[in-house]
Image: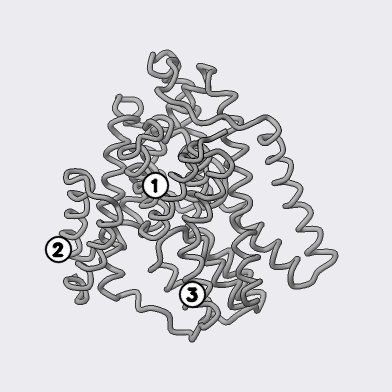
């Protein structure tokens, strides 16, 4: 049973991250690594990469799955719940409130402070990629896997490319890395084990809810079951997280005539300006469509699959990680995770965050603040907003 101080540590840590983690899933992983690998030393780079790899291999909210896993690792079930609540709550409250009072205009995405936060995300993700590459992609084989993974994601426009890359990297790892001592030796630190009943129960409940809600929406109908299935299905089946949910949610919300295209896009513009997971865009949609109860339903149902999947993923990884062949596979997968972050560093982080010399300067200073000056992530986010307001109100 985790110590109360560990649970309190989760609350404090994710309370701060929920307020300051701007920039999307790739930036969130950078913030997580800085906070929990470098600063608080909750776990090693290898254990963190294992958790990221498990998360990337499964559908759902990418950074939220990692956050839940970190919370469980530190504080058990209570830590997992608190990590999700406090990482999600700030953006859910903002987007839910905006959904209740939507006017159809949203926040101007060209506002200087928003563009400053996007520029900061470049420095954050670069810091994460460089740090993880030193630990996980430093040999000729792993570096090649990382670069090839990045190129594949950037060059192949397909929704399944990320999971395809991870599977391919796992196969290459088994073929090329099995004899390397780094692979067969135990990792410096392992993740907290998940009980057998929880691992198998999570898998069973995941599929039972998917099938049961589909049957309820199809044969019983009604707004509650229809919405519950729509949000659960989106959270259960989407790979890549973040922006990938938008076309699926648009098909349900606009295609199902829950709201207008203008209302949908207004919420999307605001979702770019708040910290935390982009999946809380569903909170906005639920609020527009069904008020407070709709917002709560949407939030719970879109994140529930992620919670079930990360529990199952951590359980099976803890059972299989000691086999040399599987450790070799995960060595390849860990290298691919570096490649996925490298691809995300370019698109969407760099392409959206850097528009000229001034935004590049903001990104470079953000990297210095994290990597060299060792300042806390919240100060980097504050710097980005202020610098953007002062320097980036004009295009640059």
Closer to the camera, 344 or 4? Answer: 4
Element class at badge 3: helix
Image quarter in which the N terminus is found: top right
Say whether residue 363 is left or right of residue 348. left
**Image vertical order of residue 30 relative to residue 354, above or below:** above
Q: Which mark is residue 29?
A: 1
Q: Which residue is mark 3?
A: 267
- Is the Cβ of the residue at disc 1 closer than 8 Å to that at disc 2? no
Q: Residue at x 46, y 22 (%)?
A: 328
The crowding category of the residue bearing disc 3, from other C-alpha atoms within 10 Å (few below 14, some 14 to 19, many at least 20), is many
Q: Which mark is residue 387?
A: none
Write down the quadrant of residue 392 in the picture. Answer: bottom left
Q: CA distance from mark 3 to mark 2?
A: 30 Å
Question: Where does residue 105 sit, x and y in percent of width and height?
Answer: 43, 84
**Image vertical order of residue 131 relative to residue 179, above or below:** below
The crowding category of the residue bearing disc 1, from other C-alpha atoms within 10 Å (few below 14, some 14 to 19, many at least 20), is many
Q: CA distance from mark 1 to mark 2?
A: 26 Å
Lower position in the chain sequence, tag 1 or tag 2: 1
Question: Where does residue 202 sit, x and y in percent of width and height?
Answer: 68, 41
Lower position in the chain sequence, tag 3 or tag 2: 3
Q: Residue at x 25, y 56 (%)?
A: 380
Lower position in the chain sequence, tag 3 or tag 1: 1
* Tag nearer the camera, 3 or 2: 3
Write down the quadrant of residue 314 in the picture. Answer: top right
Q: Which residue is situated farthest in the bottom direction here?
A: 103
Q: Which residue is mark 2?
A: 357
């Amino acid at each position: 049973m985790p110590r109360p101080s560990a649970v309190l540590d989760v609350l404090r840590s994710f309370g701060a991250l929920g307020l300051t983690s701007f920039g999307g899933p790739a930036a969130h992983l950078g913030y997580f690594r800085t906070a929990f690998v470098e600063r608080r030393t909750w776990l090693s780079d290898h254990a963190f990469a294992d958790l990221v790899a498990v998360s990337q291999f499964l559908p759902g909210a990418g950074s939220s799955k990692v956050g839940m896993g970190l919370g469980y690792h530190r504080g058990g079930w209570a830590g997992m719940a608190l990590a999700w609540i406090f990482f999600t709550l700030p953006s859910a409250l903002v987007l839910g409130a905006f959904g209740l009072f939507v006017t159809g205009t949203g926040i101007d995405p060209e506002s200087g402070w928003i563009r400053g936060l996007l520029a900061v995300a470049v420095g954050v993700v670069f810091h994460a990629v460089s740090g993880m590459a030193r630990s996980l992609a430093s040999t000729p084989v792993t570096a090649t896997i990382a670069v090839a993974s990045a190129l594949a994601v950037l060059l192949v426009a397909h929704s399944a490319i990320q999971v395809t890359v991870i599977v391919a990297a796992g196969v290459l790892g088994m073929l090329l890395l099995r004899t390397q001592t780094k692979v067969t030796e135990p990792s410096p630190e392992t993740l907290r084990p998940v009980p057998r009943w929880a691992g198998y129960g999570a898998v069973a409940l995941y599929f039972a809810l998917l099938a049961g809600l589909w049957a309820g929406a199809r044969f019983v109908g009604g707004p509650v079951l229809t919405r519950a299935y729509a949000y659960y299905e989106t959270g259960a089946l989407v790979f890549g997280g973040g922006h990938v949910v938008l076309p699926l949610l648009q098909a349900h919300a606009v295609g199902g005539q829950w709201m207008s295209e203008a209302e949908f896009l207004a919420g999307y513009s605001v979702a770019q300006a708040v910290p935390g997971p982009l999946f809380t865009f569903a909170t906005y949609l639920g609020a527009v469509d069904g008020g407070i109860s709709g917002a709560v339903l949407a939030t719970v149902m879109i994140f529930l699959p992620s919670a079930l999947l990360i529990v199952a993923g951590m359980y099976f990884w803890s059972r299989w990680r000691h086999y040399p062949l599987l450790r070799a596979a995960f060595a390849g997968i860990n290298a691919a995770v570096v490649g996925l972050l490298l691809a995300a560093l370019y698109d969407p982080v760099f392409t959206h965050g850097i528009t000229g010399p001034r935004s590049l300067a903001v990104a470079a200073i953000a990297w210095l603040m994290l990597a060299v000056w060792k300042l806390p992530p919240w100060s980097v986010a504050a710097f980005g907003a202020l610098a953007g307001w002062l320097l980036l109100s004009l295009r640059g």
